[in-house]
Amino acid sequence: TKEDGRLFKVTAKEENGLRELLCFAITGGYIQAWLSAPIATSAPLNDLKFLERLQKYSKINKGVADGAIQKLLGHLWYLSEELISLAFFDPLVPLDEKRAMLQALKEVKGSEDPPKRIKLQLSDLGVTRKPSAFITQQTKGFFNALGLPKGFLHKDPEVWLQDSDYEAAQKIVKGLKVVNDTAEKDVALIQEFNDHLTHNEEQKQFLLHIVSQHRKLCPNSKKSTVIST
């Protein structure tokens, strides 16, 4: 490749690595997962489908597939007992599966245990997993936490789109932002900012307080706003 008129030589190992990366992105299902990642309601089904695609890709490149599966298993944030409820609002989840989720929600028994992230192992992936398999008593906490109307849960999923409660709940859920990527970038930025200014924790907290106050006083960077402030 050429950059600024200079030629970079690629070793045979690097070329093979790039080839494997491109093949994985195109045929391993990574692009589809990446493009749909910002859609919160699609996250549970997307994660499960991506795991299925990775299993199939292991027949093409087992090393890459197993590495990707192992990494994904450690980041199944949307397969928690509460956040699995996002699948109720995913248009790609079939009606039969939503009925299964609804039935599972009715059958779960009460529990005082706090919600926890669901963990899967490589040995668990031999059986096709669906959102209904992760429904527990804690799933109901999702509706309470967001203050969502729950009247539609007493109706068949086939009529949910015409139900006012479902419409109101769906509007709220669709407004949820997937913030992990943005948060990680912000954390990296503030760490770099801090390292350039001070290593004193008290001073760091003081700086954060000043930045927060400044944002309140100057909600935008217009000259008129700065002058009036």
Image (cartoon, rainbow, N blue to C red):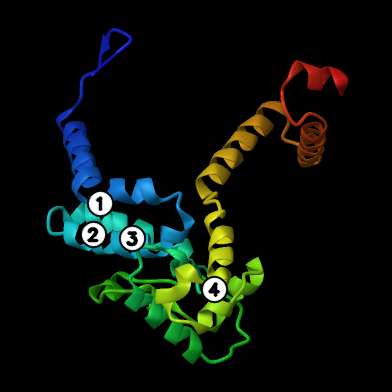
Q: Is residue 49 left or right of residue 201?
A: left
Q: CA distance from mark 4 to mark 1?
A: 28 Å
The type of residue carrying mark 3 is Gln
Nearer to the camera, 20 or 140: 140
Q: From the image, state whether disc 4 or disc 3 is nearer to you.
A: 4
- Of the two numbered discs 2 and 1 on the same chain, state the one appearing first in sequence: 1
Q: Residue at x 43, y 71 (%)?
A: 119
Q: Is residue 158 left or right of residue 49?
A: right
Q: Which mark is residue 116?
A: 4
Q: Residue at x 39, y 73 (%)?
A: 131
Badge 2 vs badge 1, beta-carbon distance below 8 Å: yes
Furthest toward the top, the residue is 5
Q: Which residue is mark 2?
A: 53
Residue 188: % across, % down: 57, 38
Q: CA distance from mark 3 to mark 1?
A: 16 Å
- Of the two numbered discs 4 and 2 on the same chain, state the one appearing first in sequence: 2
Nearer to the camera, 109 or 113: 109
Q: Which residue is mark 3?
A: 70
Whether residue 75 is visible here, answered yes or no, is no
Q: CA distance from mark 2 to mark 3?
A: 14 Å
The type of residue carrying mark 1 is Gly
| Quarter of the rendering occupied by the N terminus | top left
* 221 to 5, vertically: above or below: below
